Amino acid sequence: MLVDGIHDLGGMQGFGPVAHSPAEPVFHYEWEAVARALLMGVADAVDASGGEFRHAIERMAPDHYLTSGYYEHWLTAAATLAVEHGLVTRSELEARAGGRFPLSGPVRAEPVVDPGPDVDEPRFAVGDQVRVREWHPPGHTRCPRYVRGKAGVVVRVDGIHSLPDVEAHGSARRSEPTYSVRFAAADLWLDGQRGACVHVDLWDSYLERL
Amino acid sequence: MSDDAHHPAPLSPIELRVAALEELLTEQGLLPDGFIDEVNRRFESQTGPMNGAKVVARAWVDAEYRARLLAEGTAAIAELGFGGPEGHHMVVVENTDAVHNVIVCTLCSCYPWPVLGLPPSWYKDAPYRARMVREPRALLAEMGCPLPDDVEIRVWDSSAEVRYLVLPQRPPATDGMTEAELAALVTRDSMIGVSRL
């Protein structure tokens, strides 16, 4: 089973230099603008949540994800959602495209039927020490792998927001507070750089009190 | 040009796939006329780093605005007329002599659209997302932003609903400049935090 998707890139090594350019166009090719609009159009047509939309990208085959750019990710997610929601079929897409049309892999997580009650009040306050749960869900999550099991301190309490892990997998919803949690780089990485810290924004149920 | 019009270049495989999905959705009436232009036009004309630059310049010349911006980013940015998708929960982080901030999205490509527009390719590609949380000092130096060892680096991974904007330090020798002249000095990269002004 594919868990811990390829999109969860924080801290992975071996990628080499950043192809940085101080100025670049919004779109490099016309098709990129079209692909962007297609995902927005499909997401509207099937009423996809933000979580479902992101998970459609995250389910791409790892080799396809790493060898394609951002707007090819969007196109693949748009086509995948359109097929999964019955708007088009893969064979129709391939017939029109005159060749293979790679789609994302299947959803591995079960639909969420009962997400439990909303959390209306923050459990943690600024300055609280917390630890991130160590778990590896088969579906969508916004808890990056590189902070799981790590201890940090709450630096900001934000609003109450829909939990992506629930909204990506069905029509049920659960809302929880989110927090910005500060981790010392040395606590995240054995080779963590001195004088650096990383802040990650995390939903309430990702955290436990230390 | 007329030769091109008569003999257009054959479409690449990715262009064929985009056209296939576009046609099939259009035939079902799922893409209203003008939809594609509509969803992208504002990102090519009305939204971009020029908006964030106005916010930064205002903060440099108006201490009360700066205080509001750091306390309630979304509301202060809205005072200048900027807001919307990917900008509903803004947090502005301030660079000082002792602290340098930089933003990243390790899981996808979250970015403050109303003030910076759509993100550049390098921000969305694997090397930046993988490396900025692990070796920020080395990566910043490699990208042309070396920092003294005693400057603390704060990396902000946009993993939930908040979107971040870096408030760069006002450059030296700009005392006599107008707000508009100051805004012209502010670069996209300085508001992501991969350069200093």
Image: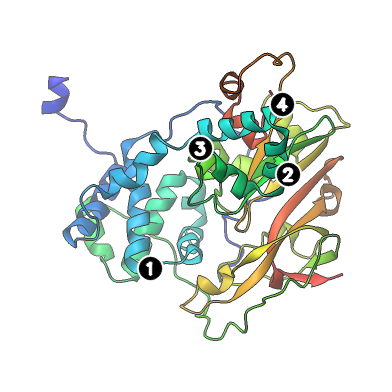
Same subunit under labels 2 and 1? no
The mark that comes first in sequence, 2 or 3, is: 3
Q: Nearer the viewer, mark 3 or mark 1?
A: 1
- Asked whether residue A45 is in view, the answer is yes
Residue A121 image position (x, y, % from top left): 71, 74
Given residues A13 and B6, the one toward you in this image is: B6
Q: Which residue is mark 4?
A: B145
- Amino acid beneath label 4: Cys
Q: Residues within 10 Å of mark 4 (few under 14, many from 20)?
A: some
The mark that comes first in sequence, 2 or 4, is: 4
Same subunit under labels 2 and 4? yes
- Asked whether residue B13 is in view, the answer is no
Q: Residue at x 68, y 27 (%)?
A: B61
- Amino acid beneath label 1: Asp
Q: How many marks do you count on the picture?
A: 4
Same subunit under labels 4 and 1? no
Q: Which residue is mark 1?
A: A47
Q: Secondary structure at mark 4?
A: loop
Q: Relative to A137, is B146 on the left or the right?
A: right
The mark that comes first in sequence, 3 or 4, is: 3
Q: Which residue is mark 3?
A: B121
Real-space Cα distance between discs 3 and 1?
28 Å
**Chain name for mark 4:** B
Q: Secondary structure at mark 1?
A: loop
Q: Which residue is mark 2?
A: B155
> The C terminus of chain A appears in which quarter of the rendering?
bottom right
Asked if the residue under mark 1 is in contact with the one under mark 3, i.e. CB atoms within 8 Å, the reply is no
